[in-house]
Amino acid sequence: MKMLLFLLSVLALLWLLRRSVQRARLRPQAPQVPEPQPMVACAQCGVHLPASDALPGRGGVFCGADHRAAFERAHPT
């Protein structure tokens, strides 16, 4: 009788363990949130943009080539 109860307990434990593993596999994954990027302001117009998208120039960083050229024309060295 003791052996039967022990065997049933082990089987129940294995069943619960298997069930929890299956549920973990079916659980949807949380969406990945991208890392925040440092923001910089365009020296010509003041628009904020990610530092990776900014264009460097003589007077700072710019949102585009047109603003960099206009700033450099207006502020010759």
Image (cartoon, rainbow, N blue to C red):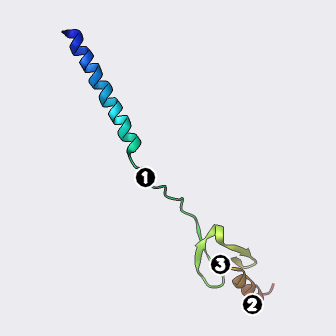
Q: Position of residue 65 (x, y in %)?
A: 72, 80
Q: Quadrant of residue 68?
A: bottom right
Q: Identify the residue at the far left of this view.
A: 1
Count residues near mark 2 (Cα–Cα under 10 Å), then give few for <14, some for 14-19, many for 20+: few
SS at circle 2: helix
**From the image, which quarter does the C terminus lie in?**
bottom right
- Whichever of callouts 2 and 1 sits on the residue coming sooner in the sequence is 1
The residue beneath circle 2 is 74
The answer to whether residue 41 is above or below residue 38 is below
- Disc number for residue 21: none
User: Which residue bears the numbered disc 3?
Assistant: 63
Position of residue 8 measured from the top left corner of the image (x, y, whole percent): 24, 19
Cβ atoms under marks 3 and 2 closer than 8 Å: no
On screen, 75 above or below 17?
A: below
- Give the mark, 3 or 1, whose residue is nearer the N terminus: 1
**Which amino acid does the dot numbered 2 rest on?**
Ala
Q: Secondary structure at mark 3?
A: loop
Instruction: Name the amino acid type tagged 1.
Output: Ala
Residue at left offset 57%, top offset 64%: 37
Residue drawn at the location 21% of the way across and 15% of the way down: 5
